[in-house]
Image: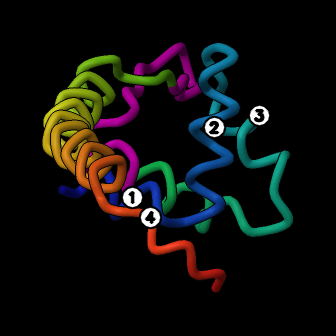
Amino acid sequence: MNAFAALADPTRQQIVEMLAAGERSAGEIAAQFAMSGPAVSQHLKVLREAGLITVRADAQRRIYALDPRGFDALDEWLRRIRRFWGGRLDELERRLRAAPDTGEAS
């Protein structure tokens, strides 16, 4: 999943967290980092290509926002994984409760 690869980078995580509070222009985003504008633009491009953010033009500015569809896809994937583990963890708990207590200390 491109989304997980995109979110693996701490800078991109920070950008997503900023955008969770509301839309931001590219300049507002770039002002929060000690890196060049082109470097921030590259991070924005990765997030956009992963389907996590959208961009729209507002005169000369580019305005970025979170794309709910990208996060819906992540959430769906995580739901499937949780179902997988939920049943297995329940089974582990049943087995641990059924195991005889040997009375030995570790």
Q: Residue drawn at (53%, 28%), measured in percent from left and top?
A: 62
> Which label's residue is closer to the chain start, 1 or 3?
1
Residue displayed at 27% across by 30% down: 70
| Residue type at tag 3 | Glu
- Who's the residue at 41% across and 20% down the image? 56
Alpha carbon of mark 1 to alpha carbon of mark 4: how far?
A: 47 Å
Label annotation for residue 26: 2
Q: Residues within 10 Å of mark 4 (few under 14, many from 20)?
A: few
Q: CA distance from mark 2 to mark 4?
A: 61 Å
Query: Which residue is depicted at the point 52% across and 14% down?
Result: 58
The tag earlier along the polypeptide, 1 or 4, is: 1
Per the image, the residue denoted by label 1 is: 6
Give the number of the disc on residue 101: 4
Question: Which mark identifies residue 28?
Answer: 3
Work out whether 102 lies above or below 73.
below
Task: Please rate how many residues cluster around mark 3, counting C-alpha atoms within 10 Å: few if below 14, some from 14 to 19, many from 20.
Answer: few
